[in-house]
Image (spheres, helix red, strand yellow):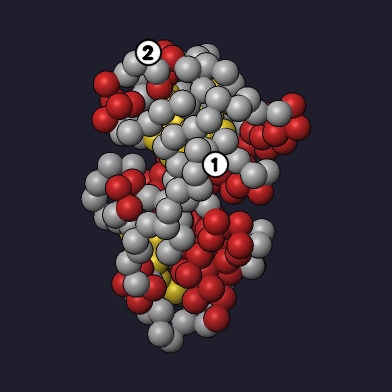
């Protein structure tokens, strides 16, 4: 993954009516099929379906418009971090394809979401996907030394990974987690308090590993 892809990705809430191409759909579904090999996750791509974001008051509150395609992020309760990690893989793949995305926690009509889940699974979030009317804008981030407890004495791969975490989307851009280097390739990620913090941790772990460029043992 090239840093330019991550730097170019911003949350986009307004979409054009242009449909996803067969190539774009095929690429996203191939990655979703790979993710769903984890039998505790159940992701799906829904296309040309305007109702989940259509006339919902929540969608208007979240300033969403024109959303007709979305990824359903679902799994068992204990899999929130894995859902965030793998959902962000889809987000970054979509960015590589020239698409725009936005993680959506509450601003949609859950009764209109078109999906069928196994027993014991539930929807955690949606990811809006499509051709944005613009490319969005960068969000504010906490400093690297704030996000990583021992950033100054950490090796270069930790610093690279932390810098990529600074570019990761989180609920309300609050970044309610902290990283710590434990020596070697071992990292610790500690949650704070708030909505979707475990999904946010998974997203951050995805970015960290891509930025670090090496396998990480998470504690």
Local packing at callout 2 (Cα closer than 10 Å; few below 14, some 14-19, many 20+) is few
Residue 110 visible here: no
Residue that appears at 27% across and 21% down: 57
- Going 34% across and 72% down the picture, which residue do you hit? 143
Report which residue position mark 2 lands on: 111
Nearer-N-terminus badge (1/2): 1
Q: Is residue 114 visible?
A: yes
Residue 202, relative to residue 77: is it above or below?
below
Q: Is residue 26 above or below residue 109?
A: below
Q: Which residue is mark 1?
A: 100
Q: Quadrant of residue 55?
A: top left
Check contact, mark 1 vs mark 2: CB within 8 A.
Answer: no
Mark 1 Cα shell of 10 Å, populated few (<14), some (14-19), many (≥20): many
In terms of depth relative to the viewer, which is nearer, 140 or 132? Answer: 132
- Residue plotted at (56% across, 33% down): 130
Secondary structure category for the residue under label 2? helix
Q: Is residue 160 left or right of residue 33?
A: left
Residue at position x 35%, y 63% in the image: 141
Q: In terms of secondary structure, where does tag 1 sit?
A: strand
**Residue closest to the eye, 7 or 210:** 7
x and y percent of residue 12 in the render?
A: 45, 42
In which quadrant of the rendered view does residue 32 lie? top right
Q: Quadrant of the N terminus?
A: bottom right
Measured in 3D between alpha carbons, the distance from the residue under mark 1 to the one under mark 2, in whole angstroms, is 24 Å
Looking at the rendered image, the quarter that the C terminus falls into is: bottom left
The percent coordinates of residue 80 (x first, y second) are 43, 40
Q: Nearer the viewer, residue 127 or 201?
A: 127
**In the figure, 154 relative to 85: above or below?**
below
Which of the 4 quarters of the picture holds residue 180? Answer: bottom left
């Amino acid at each position: 993954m090239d840093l330019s892809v991550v730097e170019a990705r911003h949350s986009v809430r307004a979409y054009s009516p242009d449909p996803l191409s067969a190539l774009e759909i095929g690429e996203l579904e191939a990655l979703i099929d790979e993710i769903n090999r984890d039998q505790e996750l159940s992701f799906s791509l829904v296309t040309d379906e305007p109702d989940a974001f259509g006339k919902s008051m929540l969608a208007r509150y979240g300033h969403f418009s024109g959303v007709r395609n979305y990824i359903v992020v679902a799994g068992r309760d204990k899999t929130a971090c894995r859902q965030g990690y793998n959902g962000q893989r889809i987000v970054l793949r979509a960015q590589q394809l020239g698409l725009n995305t936005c993680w959506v926690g509450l601003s949609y009509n859950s009764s209109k979401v078109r999906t069928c889940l196994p027993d014991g699974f539930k929807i955690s979030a949606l990811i809006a996907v499509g051709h944005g009317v613009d490319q969005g804008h960068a969000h504010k981030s906490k400093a690297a030394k704030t996000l990583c407890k021992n950033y100054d004495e950490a090796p270069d791969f930790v610093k690279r990974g932390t810098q990529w975490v600074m570019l990761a989307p989180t609920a309300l851009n609050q970044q309610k987690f902290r990283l710590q280097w434990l020596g070697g390739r071992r990292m610790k990620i500690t949650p704070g308090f708030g909505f979707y913090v475990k999904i946010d941790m998974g997203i951050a772990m995805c970015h960290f590993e891509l930025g670090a460029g090496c396998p990480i043992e998470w504690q």
